[in-house]
Image (cartoon, helix red, strand yellow):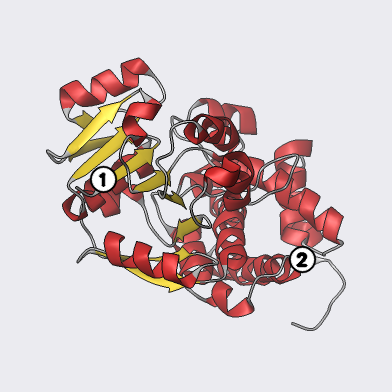
C-alpha cells in the first residue's frame, strides 16, 4: 500500500494532497492545530486556506504527526520556513525507515542562512534514508487543486532518488522534471518571492510594464548571481524553478508576495499588510536572510538590498526606486 504524508495543511499542502491523491492508496495531511484538523475533516474541505476544493476520499487529516507519518513512503513538507526546523525535530522521531523526504517549503532560514533542504538534513540527521528531494516550480495552489496543467522540478543530489520521485508523483496534470542542482532550485524558489514584492510595489505605485519587466529581468540576474556563488548552475535559473516561478509570482494575481508589494506601493505599512493576511508571504523573512547572505558572500544584490531597506528600515518606496535607477552605469 503506497502512502504519502504531507506535513502542513495550508493552501499549498492541501492543494498537493488533492492533486496527488490519485497516485497513492492513502494520503495523510497534518494540520498544526487540533481544531484545524477537525474543521477540515468535518467539512472535507479546507475552508480557511483553500475553500471550494473537496478532499478526495483517500485523504485523511490529523493533528497527530506520528499518526500522519505512519507507514508513509514519501513525506512532503509544506509548512512556512520559520517553522520547518521545529517541526522537523518532531518528524525525526516518527519517520519510517527508508522514507523519502520531499521539501515543498520555499525560503532561507534566518540566522543560519540555510536552504530548506539543508535545514531538514540538519534536523533529521541519520534518520534520512536518502538526500532530501526539493519540489519547486511555477504553481499557484488554487490552480493545482483545480487540476489545471502545471510543470515543476524535483531536485536531488541523488539522481536515482529524483527519478523515483518523478515517477511516483507525476500525474496527467502535474508534470515533473528532474534536476540534480538542489542549490539552484532552492535559491530560485526563495528569492523570486522577494522580487515579487518589488514587482508589487511597482504596480502599487501605478508604474507600467516597462518598470516591472526591468525589475523582473534584473531580479533574475541577482538570483542567478547568488545561486552561482553558492554552487548552483546558471541554466537552472533559466528553467521552471527560476524564470518560470519568477514570472508567475511577479505577475500573477494570486501571488501573496506580489500582494504585499502592491499594498506597500499604495502606502500601507508592512505591519498593516501582514496583519490583514491569512497566509504567509515568504518573501518578507527571505529578504532579510538574502541580504545577510549577500553580505556574507560579498555579492552585489541592489534590488534585494533596496527591498531590505523598504521592509525593515521603512525606506520610502519611491526613494528606493530612484536609487536603483541612479546607480553608476554599467554593462549588462
Residue 277 image position (x, y, % from top left): 47, 31
In-front residue for pair 48/314: 48
Farthest residue to the bottom: give it. Answer: 331
**SS class, disc 2:** helix
In-front residue for pair 128/7: 128
- Disc marking residue 3: 1
Residue 283 image position (x, y, % from top left): 59, 46
Above or below, 329 relative to 6: below
> Residue at (48%, 34%) from the top-left corner?
91
Which of disc 1 and disc 2 is earlier in sequence? 1
Q: In which quarter of the image is residue 190?
A: bottom right
> Residue at (87%, 62%) from the top-left corner?
298
In the rendered image, is residue 31 in sight?
no
* Mark in front: 2 vs 1: 1
How far apart are the alpha carbons under marks 2 and 1? 52 Å
Farthest residue to the left: give it. Answer: 57
- Disc marking residue 223: none
Q: Name the residue under label 2.
A: 325
Above or below, 323 relative to 127: below
Mark 1 burial class by Cα count in 10 Å: few <14, some 14-19, many 20+: some
Above or below, 212 relative to 277: below
Amino acid at each position: 500500500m503506497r502512502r504519502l504524508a504531507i506535513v502542513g495543511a495550508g493552501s499549498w499542502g492541501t492543494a498537493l494532497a488533492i492533486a496527488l491523491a490519485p497516485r497513492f492508496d492513502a494520503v495523510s495531511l497534518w494540520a498544526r492545530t487540533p481544531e484545524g484538523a477537525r474543521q477540515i475533516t468535518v467539512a472535507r474541505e479546507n475552508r480557511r486556506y483553500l475553500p471550494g476544493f473537496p478532499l478526495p476520499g483517500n485523504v485523511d487529516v490529523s493533528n497527530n504527526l506520528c499518526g500522519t507519518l505512519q507507514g508513509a513512503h514519501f513525506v512532503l513538507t509544506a509548512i512556512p520556513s520559520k517553522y520547518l526546523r521545529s517541526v522537523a525535530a518532531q518528524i525525526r522521531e516518527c519517520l519510517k525507515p527508508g522514507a523519502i523526504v520531499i521539501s515543498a517549503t520555499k525560503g532561507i532560514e534566518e540566522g543560519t542562512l540555510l536552504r530548506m533542504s539543508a535545514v531538514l538534513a540538519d534536523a533529521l540527521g541519520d534518520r534520512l534514508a536518502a538526500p532530501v528531494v526539493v519540489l519547486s516550480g511555477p504553481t499557484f495552489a488554487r490552480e493545482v487543486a483545480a487540476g489545471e496543467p502545471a510543470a515543476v522540478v524535483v531536485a536531488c543530489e541523488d539522481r536515482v532518488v529524483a527519478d523515483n520521485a518523478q515517477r511516483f508523483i507525476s500525474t496527467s496534470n502535474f508534470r515533473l522534471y528532474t534536476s540534480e542542482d538542489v542549490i539552484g532550485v532552492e535559491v530560485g524558489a526563495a528569492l523570486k518571492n522577494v522580487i515579487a514584492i518589488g514587482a508589487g510595489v511597482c504596480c502599487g505605485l501605478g508604474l507600467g510594464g516597462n518598470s516591472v519587466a526591468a525589475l523582473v529581468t534584473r531580479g533574475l540576474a541577482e538570483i542567478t548571481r547568488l545561486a552561482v556563488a553558492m554552487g548552483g548552475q546558471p541554466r537552472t535559473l533559466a528553467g521552471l524553478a527560476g524564470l518560470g516561478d519568477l514570472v508567475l509570482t511577479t505577475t500573477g494575481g494570486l501571488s501573496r508576495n506580489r500582494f504585499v508589494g502592491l499594498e506597500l506601493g499604495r502606502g500601507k505599512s508592512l505591519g498593516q499588510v501582514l496583519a490583514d493576511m491569512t497566509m504567509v508571504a515568504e518573501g518578507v523573512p527571505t529578504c532579510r536572510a538574502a541580504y545577510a547572505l549577500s553580505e556574507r558572500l560579498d555579492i552585489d544584490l541592489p534590488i534585494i538590498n533596496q527591498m531590505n531597506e523598504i521592509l525593515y528600515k521603512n525606506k520610502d518606496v519611491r526613494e528606493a526606486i530612484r536609487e536603483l535607477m541612479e546607480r553608476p552605469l554599467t554593462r549588462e
